[in-house]
Amino acid sequence: MSWRLSRNKRRPRRTKVLRVRAEGRAGRLTAGRCAVALLLAGVATLGLHLAHRGWAALRDEVLVPQRVFGLRVVDIQPDLVWLSRAEVLQWTGLRAGDNLLTLDLDRIKRDLELVPQIEEAALERLLPDTLRIVVRERQPVARVRGVLAEQGRLVPVTFFLDARGRVMPPVGADRPDLRAAWDTLPLVTGLDGTALRVGRNVDSPAVRVALEVVRAFPQSPLAGEVTLLSLDVAEPDQVQVLTAQGSEVVLPLTRPDEPLHRWRLVQEAGRRLGRSIRWLDLTVTNNCPLLWQPVEPAPAAPPPAGETSNLGGKHV
């Protein structure tokens, strides 16, 4: 009887030892499976990489050989205004003989549209050897005074703004025709010239309104009678316009349609009165504070022909 009791007491300990050994064996099996899985994943990754390189080599050397689809012609359209075709070709990074089918057109398009003078670019493959590039240049609508760092000093220059406020570089000295044509654009004043950066937009509500006025002015009834000289955006809540006729007009920061219409009405009233505007404030909504140009005195009428005058007591 005692022998049976002692034997029963030893059974739980033996079961416990067997359980511990089983758990250890399961852990070793799990670690082995993880190692095998990692090894297989590495082999698969290496195989995919080699397959990709092999496909690229097969594609370039056998399926689409460079001698068949080599780049020979770059057709740049349309005629450019202030960019040259050589500059556009340099910015693309293309070389003669590049495989036309393997060109990264998205990369070329992105690089071209980073140029401040280019607003949009489109590319098209024309097999077997031609790449067409359609470039749309930005159109300057106004000038602005700024500075450029050259050889350790700041040089005053004239930048240009498009309708969206993008700052574009000065015109080169080799383009006197463009400089003469664009010197007639209205000048935007009141900006910090040292803060202007080529390729960046001017973030200012007053500048946006000023550019909207410049863009809408040629289609307004004032276009044939008034010439814009400058637009001052120094004040944050208004734009002061100076015209070639000597008028100063203050515009609110709203859409230019309504202020230009009121300006037109005052201009017509002045024509009926034979007067011209000297100063007009259109920021006031219920009336128009106004000063007319001073009236020039009429020239003295010449004496009638044949009239005699007494000079020193003598009759002439």
Image (cartoon, grey):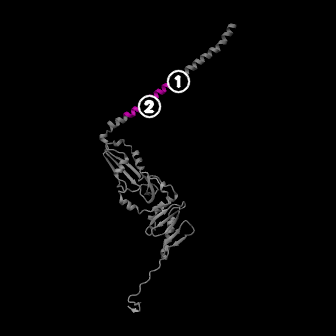
Q: Which mark is residue 122?
A: none
**Residue 90: x, y in percent?**
36, 48
Q: Main secondary structure of the magenta part?
A: helix
Give the amino acid at mark 1.
Ala
Q: Residues within 10 Å of mark 1 (few under 14, many from 20)?
A: few
- Vertically, is 2 above or below 224? above
How many angstroms separate mark 2 from mark 1 (CA)?
21 Å
The residue labelled by disc 2 is 45
**Residue 187: x, y in percent?**
45, 62
Q: Nearer the viewer, residue 299 or 284?
A: 299
So how many labels did they put on this image? 2
Q: Nearer the viewer, residue 195 or 232?
A: 195
Q: Is the C terminus in the top left, top right, bottom left or bottom right quadrant?
A: bottom left
Label 2 or label 1, whichever comes before in sequence order: 1
Q: Residue 289's quadrant in the figure?
A: bottom right
Mark 2 secondary-structure assignment: helix
Kindly give the residue lying farthest to the front in the view shown: 312
Give the magenta part as a residue range: 33-54
Kindly give the residue lying farthest to the left in the view shown: 67
The reply to whether residue 278 is in sight is yes
Task: Tell me if label 2 and label 1 are in contact, CB under 8 Å.
Answer: no
Mark 1 secondary-structure assignment: helix
**Residue 309: x, y in percent?**
41, 90
34 within the magenta span: yes
- The reply, left or right, for residue 164 in relation to residue 61 is right
Q: Which mark is residue 31?
A: 1
287 within the magenta span: no
Q: Is the N terminus in the top left, top right, bottom left or bottom right quadrant?
A: top right
Give the amino acid at mark 2.
Thr
